[in-house]
Image (tube, coloured by chain):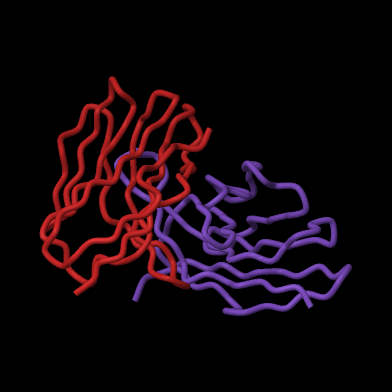
Chain colours: A red, B purple
Amino acid sequence: QQPVQSPQAVILREGEDAVINCSSSKALYSVHWYRQKHGEAPVFLMILLKGGEQKGHEKISASFNEKKQQSSLYLTASQLSYSGTYFCGTETPPGRRALTFGSGTRLQVQP
Amino acid sequence: DGGITQSPKYLFRKEGQNVTLSCEQNLNHDAMYWYRQDPGQGLRLIYYSQIVNDFQKGDIAEGYSVSREKKESFPLTVTSAQKNPTAFYLCASSIEGTRQETQYFGPGTRLLVL
């Protein structure tokens, strides 16, 4: 079953912060976050594993709450380059390594 | 440079025609995947393969077929049975055997129906 992402869209000014959530109705083994620019392939941001720690990459970090079966992506001091659609991909069924993706969160950062 | 290549970038299909999308990787990855993306939507899994000569259906396999004769290659055929093939098709690959690795995507093929 497809994870649910919220919000569906968000508009920010440069320097503002944003949080994107990804929730699943099933227990999660891992959550993978990607950013996609229009017409391009998704680019990997980070992976969070069951039992793992919160990850960070420059001003983008993420958390994974196993009990709530959800993950959150934190974008701080946003830059114009952060614009794009953010997807979470979840791995749930044992043995199926392919990811199931949410419908995406469209982020637009304005000057 | 290691990576995933997809060709062609754009593909046009006529009614009743089968078309094949190419996906090649030189990352020495065991697993390969095909996803379909419709405008404004997420990615949906068509087929995936964890090892050569083996593949499994994903969530929307009807109207598609694949083969995995070589580790580096995972072509996707869109058959005439797929009535609404217009979409962006993305191929991905990953290292098998560990859950600490993610999937990496190729640049995609945009398929349009004439």
Name which quarter of the figure residue A40 lies in: bottom left
Taking the spot 69% from the left edge, 66% from the top edge, the residue there is B86
Q: Tell me: A80 left or right of A39.
A: left
Q: Is residue A86 above or below residue A91?
A: below
In the image, taking residue A96 as reference, residue B53 lies left or right, namely right
Instruction: Residue at 58%, 51% (x, y): give it.
Output: B52
The residue at the far right in this view is B16
Question: Which residue does the image show at 51% across and 35% down from the upper left?
Answer: A96
**Please, is residue A27 above or below residue B53 in the view?**
above
Asked if A22 appears above or below A38 in the picture, the reply is: above
Q: Position of residue B78 (x, y in %)?
A: 74, 62
Q: Quadrant of the C terminus of chain A?
A: bottom left
- Where is residue A65? Give x, y as percent: 24, 28
Could you tell whether B71 is left or right of B114 in the image? left
Front-lying residue, A21 or B68: A21
Residue A108 in the image: state x and y as whole percent: 30, 65
| Left/right of residue A55 with respect to residue A7 in the rendered view | left
Where does the image place residue A64, in percent across and percent down from the top left? Answer: 24, 33
Q: Quadrant of residue A81?
A: bottom left
| Total numbered labels | 0
Location of residue A35 (image quadrant): bottom left
